[in-house]
Amino acid sequence: MKHLPFALIVLALLLSGCGGSSTSTAPAPAPQAPTASLTVSPTTISTGEATTLTWSTTSATTVSIAGIGSVASSGSQSVAPSNTTTYTLTATGTGGTAQANATAAVLAPLFSDSFDRPDQQGLGETPQGQTWMITGAGYLSVAIQDHHYVDGPSGAANVSYAGIQLSQQPVRIGGMISFLPSGTSGTGASVVALISSSDNGIQLQNMAHLIAGRTGIMLTWWQGGTSTDNLPASCTGNWEFSSPLLEDGTTYPLYMNISGSTITVDKPDVTQYVCTDPHFAQVTGTLGIWELAYDQTQEDMPRWDKAEAFSATE
């Protein structure tokens, strides 16, 4: 019996293995990472009001919102925080954890006057006991008529300024405005204006100045009394409404929301515009001024229906 060489035996074993079958297992796919989205609307409310949280998640087995507890993977819920609150949504799954935050800013009233008192010359005292400061060319014709702050037609270029010194700088200032027909055939446009000023009195030196007519608004800043009507750095400062405001007594909101160098305008057509300029932080302050510009040659009469200001809550 002949014996095969060792090398031939090894070669035969290797060749026989080449034709054999082999199996392999594909690696399991990695778990999908969760996603989370959370919004609050409206983002700013007054004390006692409610706002709505809306959220959605994917690839999560447990979902919770801090301060509320476990929630469905998507949904919405009304909340009424007493102070400015940041809500945190946490979505956890086999692929990890995702979070999203949304803040509801709660504002406390600093000042409010709906002019709900008998008709009178001047504006008298606010419900909080503050005395209105009145100045301007039309100060003698400033009055409360039918629960509105008005400036009667006493001549051309009639402008009046009604000011309140607030206990702290507001983060939101403004109110409700309306227009009525003046009864004349004039073509001029009357306006209302809103001012936040760092001055100690109605000096019109340092201020953010928001002017609103029936067709649009303009936002400017003034500094030192000599640098006036400056447009903000980040925007044109002038915006037209999609359609003119009515002159039938319909009320419209007009507010400035002030945060350092940024002013967000709540416009009468229920839209917002955001402008940023470093001067805003320097010229705004604790003096609020509600302005009217109207004379007998103009076709419509502007009114302030309500004046108010708010501070931030902690």
Image (spheres, helix red, strand yellow):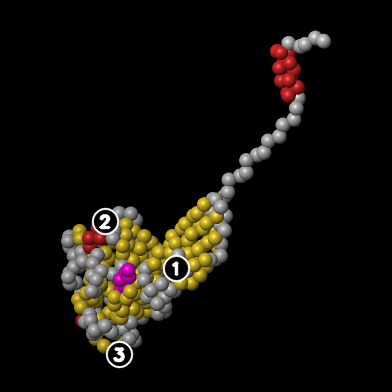
Between 205 and 246, which is closer to the camera in this rendering? Answer: 205
Q: Which residues are magenta?
A: 307-314
Residue 28: image quadrant is: top right
The kind of secondary structure element at disc 1 is: loop
Query: Nearer the viewer's eye, disc 1 or disc 3?
Result: 1
Q: Position of residue 203 (x, y in %)?
A: 17, 69
**Amino acid type assigned to the residue bearing label 2 in the image:** Pro
Q: Main secondary structure of the magenta part?
A: strand
Could you tell me the amino acid type at mark 3? Pro
Q: CA distance from mark 1 to mark 3?
A: 47 Å
Horizontal relation, residue 43 to residue 232: left or right: right
Dot 3 corresponds to which residue? 118
The residue tagged 1 is: 67
Q: Tell me which residue sits at (71%, 17%) in the image.
A: 10
Residue 216 is situated, as x and y percent measured from the top left of the image, at 37, 66
* Residue 185 percent location from the top left of the image: 36, 76
Which of these two is toward me, 307 or 26?
Answer: 26
- Count residues near mark 3 (Cα–Cα under 10 Å), then give few for <14, some for 14-19, many for 20+: few
> Quick one: SS at disc 3?
loop
Residue 146 left/right relative to 39: left
**The quadrant where residue 177 appears:** bottom left
Which comes before the other along the chain, label 1 or label 3? 1
